[in-house]
Image (tube, grey):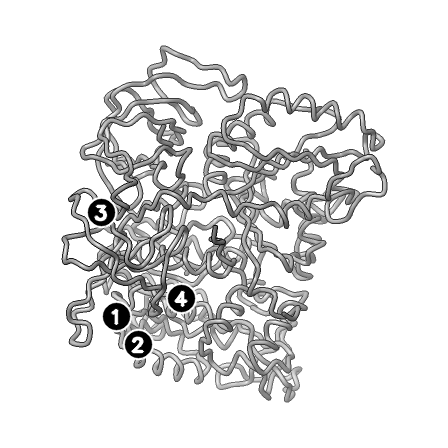
Amino acid sequence: MTDQNNYLDMDLLRFTTAGSVDDGKSTLIGRLFHDTKAIFEDQLEAIERSSKQRGDEHINLALLTDGLRAEREQGITIDVAYRYFATPKRKFIIADTPGHIQYTRNMVTGASTANLALILVDARNGVVEQTRRHTFIADLLGIKHVAVCINKMDLVDYDEKAYEKVLRQYTDFASRLENVTDLTFIPISALKGDNVVDRSENMQWYKGPPLLYHLENVYVGSDSNHVDARFPVQWVIRPHSDEHHDFRGFSGRVAGGVFKLGDKVTILPSGFSTKISKILKGETEIEEAYHPQSVTILLEDEIDVSRGDMIVKPNNQPKVEQDLDAFICWFSGNKKLSKGSKFIFRHTTKEAQAIVSDIRYKVDVNSLRKMEDVETFDMNDIGRVSLRISQPIFHDTYRRNRNTGSFILVDPFTNETLAAGMLR
Amino acid sequence: MQNYNLTHLEQLESEAIFILRETAAQFERPGLLFSGGKDSIVMAHLAAKAFSPAKIPFPFVHVDTGHNFPETIAFRDSFVKKTGVQLIVGYVQGSIDKGTAVEETGPNASRNALQSVTLLETIEKESLDACLGGGRRDEEKARAKERFFSHRDAFGQWDPKNQRPELWNLFNGRKSQGENFRIFPLSNWTEMDVWQYAKIENIELPNLYFTHEREVVDRNGSLLAVSEFVTPRDNESPKKETVRFRTIGDATCTGAVLSTASNLDEVIAEVAASRVTERGARADDRRSEAAMEDRKKQGYF
């Protein structure tokens, strides 16, 4: 395969970063972009112009992500910014989230689709509140891979002891995490470029790979659930044409497991069983479909199936329940959650109504302590609640499957997205 | 066990198809904004795949500035004929004639910003509750914070500071009367992804995207094609150059680039080596630092 065609073989890594203005996050992203040629000359010129206008001493790379006028004026980042770069091996999507206002909401949003969390720690300050907060959220959102970059090593004379001190602090605290299975530590200097793209000459004691190599090679293929077959029906295709008179196809995105031609399947909620007679990807017939492919499934028997139903295997079915136990992150600044609150509940392709039957506890994201006897959830609160849903929900635990274990709560009056939830 | 990995293009394709189907399911009357540019062509191709073998279940909508490259309109019409979808055209000239839009005057006058007026009028006239656009987050910094499902109030305005958070694959398209959505299935695609996908899917694109000879003038660093809409000024001397377009928009503000790339492989190689973004040649974005944000707040694509 020639260089030109290597894109036929590239895969995708989504990662999230979080941090405040001065921990070097922008510098690090800027360096990754610069060294992988993701910053273009006209962008660089525009940033240089604005940096000069603002009187910044160095080129301010935050200006690359902070495009909104209010952000530029106030020097803050308002929202999750999505950034893209690619190497010949991988395309990367960064969900870059600000470290201050609405931090939880933004971090949770960024982490919900990420495979990896990149956490920056200042080698001089060690693990701080924000490090713990970000790590906790990454773990809560089911991220398995965490890359801890111990930054500003140039300011501690590239000293191995400084690195090891941070590593010990972090490992102590990380022993309580539930989902993270791959924890990697990399000593770097984003400013000087040590261990970002190339191996550092200044830290011969570090035997691991530089950050970009790690990002290019970390194996995320086994993170998806390929065991429990789940297919939430999104849309029913009925062409109403002479040529395809009897065609009835059920479209959707495989949420877990593998569906093969001829497989025996059960439809929920009806419980009818039949076999898969055809799988289509566009116009092409394929033999099997797996997460996260968008396909159309045809069934042998004529069964009533519509949006919100789920196609599964008879010997491996999800939980079907109306009373749910969930972790939620409350986003709204306008509204609070309390016992008895009613919401619209969105889960896979299904919409129902939910009522809060119990508030169990909140978690202090800084100390990770449980707070019981709480009555309401305010903006950025995280904790555990019980919900009663207007109809049975086909689900798995979030830990087992992110797609069938996640939901959002929507305000029935303003239509605002109020909360994100993960089923236990 | 078998390797169940998808390539980056397969993942992007699957995500875009999911969004297109979600749009059909959550809205009563969506429309697909079709400009004849490469992004909208790729989006239309994905829509055809998403609903195959049925027809695409929504109309195409074109906001016509009247300042088109003739190639674009010819391509649009043949594409619509081939797919059999309904085409709705909103004319900027119509808005000007009605007095709802006022033609810009001055040396760099363009109808680009007026498209917002015509788009909003078309949305209202056709009762569209969602418009699918080919916008990508990598295009411009104000787009970097755009959602897949982007809520617009009853005035068609975008409020970047008050967007709904988007988590997992759960998209909230609920709205009140009069409000609508812009939906961007290609949000996570880059320019390179679009070219690569066009290549592997064998998608036909207008010949403006490939090298040809054309008379151009150099205006503020953009190579503008000489046409009935762009006439050389006294201090400008038109030249014949070997060029192609990286983006296609209104002929008054879409700059060409010097290029000999005659097919998709050569375009991909050229984009890979390029040091300037594709919108670098677009005069509409250069007007000010927040030019795109301002237009979007007023209802732009």
How many circles with numbers are drawn on the protein?
Answer: 4
Mark found first going from the N terminus, 1 or 2: 1
Q: Residues within 10 Å of mark 1 (few under 14, many from 20)?
A: some
**Which secondary structure lies at badge 3?**
strand
Residue A127: horizontal and vertical position, in percent?
66, 24
Residue B180: horizontal and vertical position, in percent?
30, 53
**Could you tell me if the residues under marks 4 and 3 are in contact, i.e. CB atoms within 8 Å?**
no
In the image, what residue occupies the spot 48% across and 32% down? A102
Residue A101 in the figure: left or right of residue B72: right
Residue placed most toward the observer, A118 or B127: A118
In the rendered image, which residue does mark 1 sit on? B55
In the rendered image, which residue does mark 2 sit on? B83
Q: Residues within 10 Å of mark 3 (few under 14, many from 20)?
A: many
Same chain for mark 1 and mark 2? The answer is yes
**Could you tell me if the residues under marks 1 and 2 are in contact, i.e. CB atoms within 8 Å?**
yes
Same chain for mark 1 and mark 4? The answer is yes
Amino acid carrying label 1: it is Lys
Cα separation between marks 1 and 4:
14 Å
